[in-house]
Image (spheres, rainbow, N blue to C red):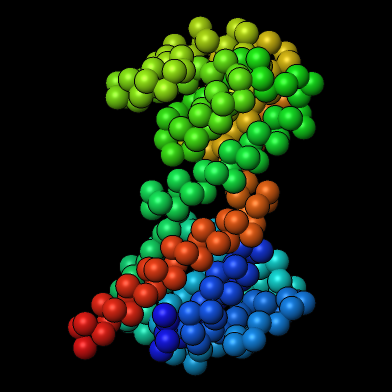
Amino acid sequence: MLTGIHATFIGGDARQLEVIKKFIELDASVTLIGFDNLESNFIGATKKELSLDVLQETDALILPIVGTDDEGVVESIFCSKPVQLTDKHFEVMNKNMVIYTGMAKPFLRDHSQAYQLQLVEILDRDDVAIYNSIPTVEGALMMAIQNTDITIHGSTCIVLGLGRVGISMARALHALGAHVRVGARKPEHLARIYEMGLSPFELDDLAEQVDDVDIVYNTIPKMVVTPQIIARMPHHTLIIDLASKPGGVDFRYAEKRGIKALLAPGLPGIVAPKTAGQIIAKTLSRLVSEQMADREGSS
């Protein structure tokens, strides 16, 4: 239970609604900022404008997955005017307050550090990333079906990277009957790919792997699919970049050559916001409960 915790939510998308529901169920005191246009009202939550008083009373400040932009603006699909955090807001924040977000840009990181506030980025956690890989993979498969004229079964697919998304992506493609090659750098990853019954190759050898590929899934957040690589692909190849922005594909050259390349960030929130929100809600409620226990233990 979160009885006695004052949680303030600023902005977000449909995923945030699941988190709010969970916190209300667990008896937290919930304040919503940037939800002016939300059609349904939550019983047990209060809508307010961003003010210094609210932040002074907050134990857990919950921001959207992207947190803020480089100017402190918090995005919200439920509000017509932007909500912006400034130095004045950080100055009054309770030093025992914890800020939770998916990933933090420099503005949020720098201000949290400058004002000695604890910042938790939940997408850095293995559990959240692995759970999130499920809707990511489903969305990535949907994109392939929508943008090709072949079945995944029997196709030749390449997955770049064997991280948390790469493993799930390669496993799903294999289960659907695709011929799956997986590129990685670490010897232990190459060994794991072999153990999974897939075809491993070192990333340095990518150019030799793409001459017959139908679909390429990239999960590596740095430039790996270069013009030299794209030049060797068949014209029908579809590239889907699942890495965080700016991705790892030269989109300019792909377009120039007539190869369809799609950047697909934030798929969980697009294809399955309810499930993605429940994943976040489960983790955040546990983290805030631990925060409350730590606070009580130190008092």
Evaluate whether residue 27 shows in this view.
yes
Q: Is residue 126 left or right of residue 188?
A: right
Which residue corresponds to the image point at 74% horizontal and 30% vertical from the top-left? 145
* Image quarter (top left, top right, bottom left or bottom right) of the C terminus: bottom left
In the displayed structure, 272 sits above or below 258; it is: below
In the displayed structure, 266 sits above or below 32; it is: above
Which residue corresponds to the image point at 54% horizontal and 84% vertical from the top-left? 30
Which residue corresponds to the image point at 33% horizontal and 75% vertical from the top-left? 291
Q: Position of residue 294 (x, y in %)?
A: 26, 77
Which residue corresponds to the image point at 57% horizontal and 74% vertical from the top-left? 20
Q: Position of residue 155 (x, y in %)?
A: 65, 16
* Image quarter (top left, top right, bottom left or bottom right) of the N terminus: bottom left
Q: Is residue 68 left or right of residue 1?
A: right
Evaluate whether residue 259 shows in this view.
no
Q: Is residue 84 left or right of residue 204?
A: right
Q: Kindly indicate the quadrant of the structure image that contains residue 44.
A: bottom right
Of 226 and 266, the residue lying toward us: 266
- Residue occupying the far bottom of the picture: 53
Q: Position of residue 66 (x, y in %)?
A: 54, 58
Q: Position of residue 194 (x, y in %)?
A: 39, 17
Of 118 and 166, the residue lying toward us: 166
